[in-house]
Image: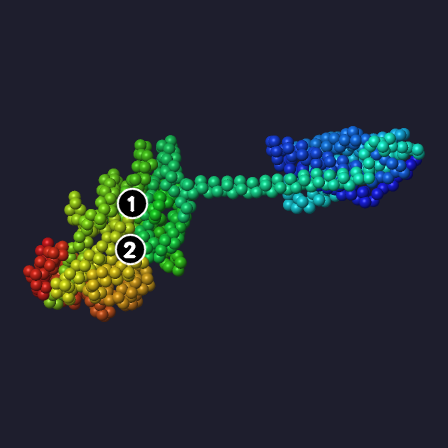
C-alpha cells in the first residue's frame, strides 16, 4: 500500500474553511427563516450555493492537502458533480431549519439525508482522482465517517434551528457553534481520507489531462472565501436594512398613531377634543335609547382663567388648564367622558341619571376647582361655572344637547359664576340673544357706538364738585342704551374688555384734558378697571401713553379697582399699584366691604380712597348693622389716611347721615345721574360747580 502525507498548512486552511462555511450556514438559516415570499426563496437559493461551495471547498482543500508519492489530478466533471451534491445537501439543510417546527423525527431524517449527501460529496470527490487500480476503503473507518457525517449534520441542523432567531449574544453563540460544526465536518472528511487505501503501483489517470494541483489549493481558497464573505456581507447589509426598515416602520406606526391621537385629542391636556366628544356623545345617546336610560352633560367654564392668562402669561395658563383637567378627571368616574372643547371650556358626559345625581357631581367639581393651585410659585385661585343638560328626550341629537348645556352654563355665568345651572327651554332664546349681542359687541368699537357718561363726585362737606366718574355705555342702534351689566360680563368672557377698556381710558383722559382747558383744573376723573385689565401686562404702558397723548397731569386721573381684584393676588396687586402711584395716578378701592381684605395688605396698598359699596348705603337709615359697618369703614379709612367715598346716595337722609359719619365725598342719583359730557358741562354752567346740592337732571 502507498503511504500518503498531509500539508499541515492546507489542513489548517481546510479547518478554517469548514468553520467559515458553518458560520455562513448558521447565518443563512437565520436570513431564510426571517424572509418572506420571493425574498425567502432568493435567500434559500443563494444561501445554498454559498454554503455548498464552502463545505465543498473545505473537502477539496483537504484532498489537496493529501500528498501521495505520485502525480495526482482530478476529473473536472466528477469534481463538479461533487460540488453540485454539496449545494443540494445545503439546500435541503436550509429548507429543514426554516420550517416552523423541528421535531425529533424530522431532525433524525434530516441528519441522515444531509449526512448521506456530505458522504456522497466526499467520496464522489475522491472518485475524481481516477486511480488505477481503484481506491479501496477500510470498512470500519468508512462506517465511522458516515456516522460522523450523520451526527455532524444532526448537530448542525439543531444549532441552525435554535440560533436562527435573534437572541441576546447570538453572534457569539453562532461563532461557538460554527467551531463545533467545522471540527465535526473536518473530522468526517479526514476520517474518510483515513479510510482510503491506495495499492502499491497505483497511478492517477488524470495527471496529464486533469487539473493541476499546484495552484488549485490557492485558487479554491480565494474563491470560496470570496463567495462566503460576499454571502455574509449581503446578509449583514440585509439585516441592517431590515432593522432600519423595522425601526422606520415602527416610527411611522408610532407617528401615525400619534397623529390619529392628536386628531381626536387636545394636545395640551390629552383629553378628547370636540370631534371625539361628539362621537362619544352620539354613541351614548344610542345606548340610552336602546336601554331606556338617561345621562347628563355638564358644560364647564373656568371663572377667572383669562385673568390668570393675562397676568402670568400663557405658559402658566396652560399649566393651570392641565391642573384643572386632572382635578376634573379625578372627580369623575372612569366610564364618564371628559373633553376639552377649547380655551378654558370642558364638557363631561356623566353617568348621572337624575338631577340630584348631576347636582351632586357639579358640587364636587366646584369644590375641586376652588382649591388653590400653586403654579410657578404663584398661588392661583379660580372657580367654575357649570351648565347641566339631562338627556331625557329621545329626539335630541348631540348638537342640541351640547347647545343646551352651554346655554345653562352661560346662565350660571350671568347669575354670578362659581355655581351650576340646569337647562331650561327659555335659555335657548337667551343664548340666541347672547350670540347676537356678542356679534354686535364685536362691531361696536369700529362703529363708534360706545359713549361715556359722567356721574359727579361731590364733596360731602360743602357740596363742591370734585370731578366725575366715567361710566361706559353702549348706544346700540336697535336696542338703544345697553346697561353695562348686560355687555361688560360678555366683554370680559370674550376678551373684548381690553379693547373697550383701552378706549374708555383714552376717552376719559381726553375729556378731562378738555375740562382742564375750560378752567376746571381741580377736577379729577375716575375710571374703573376690570380684573382682566388690572392684571394685563400692558396696563402701566397704556395708562402712561393715554396721559401723554392728551397732556394730562397724572393727579387728574383716578383708577378704581374692586376690593376682590386687589386681594386676588395681594403681592402682585401691590407691585402694580406702586407703579401707578409712582406715576402720580390716584388709586381708589371700589366696592369696599364686599370682599375679604387683609388689614395687613390694605395698609400696604398705595391707595388714596375707599369707596363704600352702594349695598350698605341703600338701607342705611333703616338698618343699624349697615350703619355700623359704614361707621367702621369710615373710621378705618381715616386711620389709614384714606379718603372715604360713599356711592348710591339717593335720599337727603342718606346724604346727611353719611356726611355726619365723616365721608369725604358722595356719589348717587340725588347728586347727579350719569350723563354725556356735553350735558354734564351744561349743568355745571347752569348750577355752578360749588352749588350746595349739585344735582344733574338725567
Judged from the image, the secondary structure of the residue bearing numbered disc 2 is helix
- Looking at the image, residue 346 sits to the left or right of residue 648; the answer is right
Residue 656 visible in the picture: no
Q: Residue at x 32, y 34 (%)?
A: 397
Tell me the mark number nearer the camera, choosing from 1 and 2: 2
Q: Residue at x 20, y 61 (%)?
A: 550
Quadrant where the C terminus lies? bottom left
Specify the quadrant of the image occupied by residue 73: top right
Residue 338 point in image, percent of width and height: 39, 43
1 or 2: tag closer to the N-terminus: 1
- Residue that label 2 marks: 532
Relative to 327, 406 lies left or right: left
Where is residue 388? Give x, y as percent: 31, 43
Q: Position of residue 195 (x, y in %)?
A: 86, 35
Residue 404 position in % (x across, y down)? 29, 40
- Numbered disc 1: secondary structure: helix
Characterize the local packing of mark 2: few (<14), some (14-19) or many (20 or more) Cα atoms within 10 angstroms: many
134 to the left or right of 341: right
Dot 1 corresponds to which residue?
409
- Which residue is outermost to the left? 686
| Vertical order, 36 against 525 (above or below) | above
Which one is in front, 633 or 376?
A: 376
Dividing the picture into quadrants, the one containing residue 520 is: bottom left
Is 646 left, or right, of 15 in this rendering?
Answer: left
**How many marks can you see?**
2
Amino acid at each position: 500500500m502507498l503511504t500518503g502525507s498531509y500539508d499541515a498548512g492546507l489542513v489548517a486552511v481546510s479547518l478554517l474553511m469548514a468553520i467559515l462555511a458553518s458560520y455562513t450556514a448558521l447565518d443563512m438559516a437565520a436570513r431564510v427563516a426571517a424572509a418572506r415570499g420571493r425574498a425567502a426563496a432568493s435567500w434559500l437559493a443563494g444561501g445554498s450555493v454559498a454554503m455548498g461551495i464552502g463545505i465543498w471547498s473545505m473537502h477539496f482543500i483537504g484532498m489537496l492537502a493529501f500528498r501521495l508519492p505520485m502525480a495526482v489530478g482530478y476529473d473536472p466533471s466528477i469534481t463538479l458533480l461533487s460540488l453540485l451534491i454539496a449545494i443540494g445537501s445545503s439546500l435541503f439543510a436550509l429548507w429543514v431549519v426554516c420550517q416552523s417546527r423541528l421535531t425529533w423525527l424530522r431532525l433524525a431524517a434530516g441528519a441522515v439525508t444531509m449526512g448521506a449527501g456530505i458522504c456522497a460529496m466526499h467520496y464522489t470527490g475522491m472518485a475524481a482522482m481516477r486511480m488505477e487500480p481503484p481506491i479501496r476503503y477500510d470498512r470500519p473507518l468508512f462506517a465511522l465517517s458516515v456516522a460522523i457525517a450523520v451526527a455532524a449534520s444532526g448537530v448542525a441542523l439543531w444549532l441552525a434551528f435554535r440560533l436562527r432567531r435573534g437572541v441576546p449574544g447570538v453572534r457569539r453563540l453562532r461563532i461557538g457553534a460554527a467551531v463545533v460544526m467545522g471540527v465535526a465536518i473536518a473530522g468526517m472528511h479526514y476520517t474518510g481520507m483515513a479510510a482510503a487505501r491506495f495499492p502499491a503501483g497505483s497511478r492517477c489517470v488524470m495527471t496529464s489531462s486533469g487539473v493541476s494541483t499546484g495552484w488549485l489549493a490557492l485558487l479554491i481558497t480565494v474563491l470560496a472565501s470570496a463567495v462566503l464573505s460576499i454571502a455574509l456581507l449581503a446578509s449583514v447589509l440585509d439585516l441592517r436594512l431590515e432593522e432600519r426598515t423595522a425601526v422606520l416602520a415602527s416610527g411611522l406606526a408610532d407617528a401615525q398613531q400619534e397623529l390619529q391621537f392628536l386628531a381626536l385629542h387636545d394636545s395640551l391636556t390629552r383629553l378628547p377634543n370636540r370631534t371625539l366628544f361628539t362621537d362619544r356623545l352620539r354613541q351614548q345617546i344610542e345606548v340610552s335609547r336602546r336601554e331606556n336610560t338617561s345621562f347628563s352633560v355638564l358644560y364647564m367654564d373656568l371663572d377667572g382663567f383669562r385673568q390668570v392668562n393675562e397676568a402670568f402669561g400663557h405658559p402658566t395658563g396652560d399649566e393651570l388648564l392641565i391642573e384643572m383637567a386632572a382635578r376634573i378627571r379625578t372627580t369623575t368616574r372612569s366610564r364618564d367622558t371628559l373633553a376639552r372643547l377649547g380655551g378654558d371650556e370642558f364638557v363631561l358626559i356623566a353617568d348621572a341619571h337624575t338631577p340630584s345625581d348631576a347636582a351632586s357631581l357639579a358640587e364636587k367639581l366646584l369644590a375641586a376647582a376652588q382649591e388653590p393651585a400653586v403654579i410657578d410659585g404663584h398661588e392661583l385661585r379660580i372657580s367654575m361655572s357649570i351648565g347641566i343638560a339631562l338627556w331625557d328626550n329621545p329626539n335630541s341629537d348631540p348638537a342640541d344637547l351640547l347647545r343646551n348645556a352651554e346655554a345653562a352654563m352661560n346662565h350660571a355665568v350671568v347669575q354670578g359664576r362659581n355655581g351650576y345651572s340646569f337647562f331650561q327651554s327659555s335659555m335657548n332664546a337667551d343664548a340666541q340673544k347672547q350670540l347676537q349681542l356678542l356679534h354686535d359687541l364685536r362691531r361696536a368699537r369700529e362703529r363708534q357706538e360706545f359713549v361715556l357718561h359722567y356721574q359727579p363726585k361731590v364733596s360731602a362737606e360743602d357740596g363742591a364738585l370734585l370731578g366725575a366718574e366715567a361710566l361706559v355705555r353702549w348706544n346700540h342702534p336697535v336696542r338703544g342704551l345697553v346697561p353695562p351689566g348686560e355687555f361688560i360680563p360678555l366683554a370680559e368672557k370674550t376678551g373684548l374688555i381690553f379693547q373697550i377698556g383701552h378706549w374708555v381710558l383714552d376717552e376719559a383722559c381726553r375729556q378731562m384734558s378738555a375740562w382742564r382747558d375750560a378752567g376746571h383744573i381741580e377736577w379729577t376723573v375716575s375710571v374703573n378697571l376690570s380684573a382682566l385689565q388690572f392684571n394685563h401686562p400692558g396696563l402701566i404702558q397704556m395708562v402712561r401713553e393715554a396721559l401723554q397723548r392728551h397732556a394730562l397731569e397724572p393727579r387728574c386721573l383716578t383708577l378704581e379697582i374692586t376690593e376682590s381684584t386687589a386681594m386676588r393676588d395681594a403681592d402682585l396687586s401691590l407691585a402694580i399699584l406702586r407703579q401707578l402711584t409712582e406715576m402720580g395716578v390716584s388709586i381708589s378701592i371700589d366696592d369696599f366691604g364686599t370682599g375679604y381684605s387683609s388689614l395687613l395688605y390694605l395698609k400696604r396698598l398705595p391707595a388714596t380712597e375707599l369707596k363704600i359699596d352702594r349695598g350698605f348705603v341703600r338701607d342705611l337709615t333703616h338698618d343699624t348693622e349697615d350703619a355700623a359697618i359704614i361707621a367702621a369703614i369710615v373710621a378705618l379709612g381715616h386711620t389709614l389716611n384714606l379718603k372715604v367715598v360713599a356711592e348710591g346716595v339717593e335720599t337727603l337722609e342718606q346724604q346727611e347721615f353719611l356726611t355726619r359719619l365723616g365721608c369725604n365725598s358722595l356719589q348717587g342719583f340725588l347728586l347727579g345721574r350719569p350723563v354725556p359730557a356735553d350735558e354734564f358741562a351744561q349743568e355745571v354752567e347752569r348750577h355752578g360747580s360749588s352749588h350746595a346740592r349739585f344735582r344733574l337732571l338725567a
